[in-house]
Image: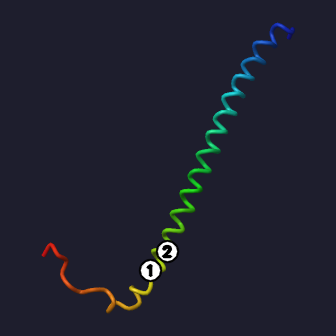
Amino acid sequence: MDQQGLEPRIEKIEIKLAFLEDFLNRLQEETLERNALLDKLSAEYGAMKERLLPLSQEPELIPSRKPPHY
């Protein structure tokens, strides 16, 4: 294959590579955001679990009155 035949192929490969690099960068940013959200939700879940665990072990601490809409 001559030089002129290679140039269009190389250009197509470079274009595809540029798109793949952009996609990879966006995917990495999204992954980091999702991991941060997952860490936050995990911490919130742990805090809620710590608060609810004593209540589940001692049901008499849970008020037994009817809700206000009754």
Question: Exactly how many numbered labels are in the figure?
Answer: 2
Q: In the figure, residue 21 lies in which quadrant?
A: top right
Q: Which residue appears at 55% of the width and 59% of the height?
A: 38
Most foreground residue, 36 or 9: 36
> How packed is label 2: few (under 14 Cα within 10 Å), some, or many (20 or more)?
few
Tell me which amino acid carries mark 2.
Ala
User: Residues at badges 1 and 2 in contact (C-beta under 8 Å)?
Assistant: yes
Label ID, residue 9: none
Calculate the distance from the C-alpha at mark 1 to the C-alpha at mark 2: 6 Å
Q: Which residue appears at 81% of the width and 13% of the height?
A: 6
Q: Which residue appears at 48% of the width and 70% of the height?
A: 45
Q: Residue 33: image x %, image y %?
A: 58, 50
12 left or right of 63 in image: right
Q: Mark 2 = which residue? A: 47
38 left or right of 6 in image: left
Q: Mark 1 = which residue? A: 51
Q: Is disc 2 placed on a helix, strand or loop?
A: helix
Q: Which residue appears at 33% of the width and 90% of the height?
A: 61
Tell me which amino acid carries mark 1.
Arg
Q: In the rendered view of the protein, which quadrant contains the N terminus?
A: top right
